[in-house]
Amino acid sequence: MTTVLSVRRRIAGIARAQPDRTALIGFDAGLAEQVLSWRQFAGQVADAAEGLRAALDRGTRSCAVVPAGNTLPAAIAITAALAAEVPVFPLNPAAPPIERDALLRLLGRRFAHGYLVDAQLRPQRIDLPAGPDLPAGPEPRAGAGAVAYLLATGASTGIPKISARHGPLRYDPVLTPSLVIRQAGWRTAQRQLIAGPLYHAAPFTAFLDAVLDANTVVLQPFFAPQWTVELVRLYAIEWLQLTPAHMREILRLPDLDPAGFASVRAMLHTAARCDPDTKRGWIGLLGPERVYELYGATEGVGVTLVRGEEWLARPGTVGRGFLTQIRILDDTGRPVPPGTAGTVFMRTPRRAGRSGYVGDQAIRTTPDGFATVGDRGRLDFGGYLYLEPRDHDTINVGGEKVDPDEVEAALRDHPAVADAVVVAVPHGTLGSVVGAHVVLRPGASVRKAELAAHCGRRLAGYKIPKHFTFVDHVPRSAAGKVQRWRLAPHHESSATTP
């Protein structure tokens, strides 16, 4: 019989058993190393949790809002809220005011007050814009309606959403971390690097699992590829989670030595679709047995998992469902045969783990319990899933469909190109043509005609960009997903022919 523990009891138990072992390693504003033992970490979490409980207005629904940079205070504040069983929302501390206000308005659909926990771990009450259906009374601590944490999602489309994970959070040695994460090379008490920001779903949940499973966590305050490699070597990191954007930047480093990754048991990548060149590069760097890919969603509708060997046998797949059934449906809701693209619906037996949206947004479901977040894909005859671009990303050129990822990968293959994103540009005859925003490598130069010719050697004619705009950077979410909605209006007004 397993013992299920609250966050507070689990952390206190680790601190009693291993008080002097390192829990967290972080860096201050000057990038000086900061180290917390489990005794220190548990003590600060307990103090912060008590301060949060004392500050709460217990008569109304309230949540903790933590500016979640990858710092020790943010990590302590998040853990303290979970220990106090107060719903916690990790906020991007650099979010533009418009985005921040939109997220706070969404929180106001469920909570009357937020408590902003600052770097000194002091909770400061903020009033949230009240929604029309705000329930009266305090936030439920358990049972139906209870929430452990909330996460922002929807960054790739520009439409903010907040997903709420049912709570309270508990430590179960059988289920922490989830079985799919354990299958991806995870081990209890391992040394783990958090390279992505804590306000994004994958790093956030990896951090929670790490704390509850007694890992030593290294928090990288911002991503810099050379620094990531150095942290892996310096702290003998055994497990890390990256995005394809991280992976591409690391592969571009000169003299990248596989020996620096000797300690790594597994690298799991999530979030955006990974181009084949990047995937093969990491399989060559680590070996296929140490490269894992997980496809899922913040909303928790289901997951797939694939290891390097499987991917090499089926290039482009994101794997088979892990304790998850997958169904591909057409626009009328009918199943399509293998090899045919449609909307990806998933169903998992642990429906209690599924999250819901805050506000009046809803996850689309079928009567028999399959759910979708709108992704498109196809299944092969072996049940392996291959993702397709979403309808709002696909570019329609005179009836021909263009996958932006394919064009972007071709552009990035040019030696002068550091990054690229393509969008639809209106055209009077064809409806749309392909336009490209291109980031050049430092000191590099290239003519637009040369880029078009480069693409022409790799792509069909209708896929070749007809407009090029050179930019300083490509807007991406914290997960590395391209935010095309931030570029499209600018491109339509400033596109130039090659």
Image: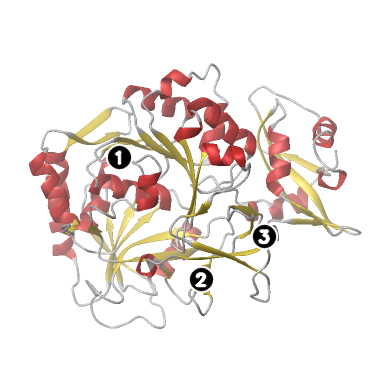
Structural crowding at the residue carrying mark 3, measured as other residues with C-alpha within 10 Å and reported as few (<14), some (14–19) or many (≥20) = some
Nearer to me, 277 or 202: 277
Q: Quadrant of residue 442?
A: top right
Q: Amino acid at mark 2?
A: Phe
Q: Secondary structure at mark 2?
A: loop
Please identify, in this view, whether the residue under mark 1 or under mark 3 is nearer the observer.
3
Q: Residue 344, position in %: x, y?
A: 59, 63
Q: Amino acid at mark 1?
A: Arg
Q: Which residue is mark 2?
A: 370
Q: Secondary structure at mark 1?
A: loop
Q: Which residue is mark 1?
A: 187
Identify the image quadrant of the N terminus: bottom left
Q: Quadrant of residue 168?
A: bottom left
Q: Which residue is mark 3?
A: 338
Q: Residue 436, position in %: x, y?
A: 74, 43
Give above or below for 423 relative to 267: below
Please say if the residues under marks 1 and 3 sit with CB atoms less than 8 Å apart. Answer: no
Say which label, 1 or 3, has the lower sequence index.
Answer: 1
Structural crowding at the residue carrying mark 2, measured as other residues with C-alpha within 10 Å and reported as few (<14), some (14–19) or many (≥20) = some
Residue at 39% of width from left, 83% of height from top? Answer: 133
Q: Residue 404, position in %: x, y?
A: 71, 48
Say which label, 3 or 2, has the lower sequence index.
Answer: 3
Q: Secondary structure at mark 3?
A: loop
Nearer to me, 351 or 471: 351
Most extreme residue toward the left is: 16
Give above or below for 212 relative to 52: above
Q: Residue 228, position in %: x, y?
A: 42, 29
Say which label, 2 or 1, has the lower sequence index.
Answer: 1
**Is residue 181 left or right of 9 when viewed as pictured?**
right
Residue at 64% of width from left, 55% of height from top? Answer: 381
Question: Gap between marks 3 and 2, in whole Å?
Answer: 18 Å
Whether residue 200 appears in this view of the structure is: no
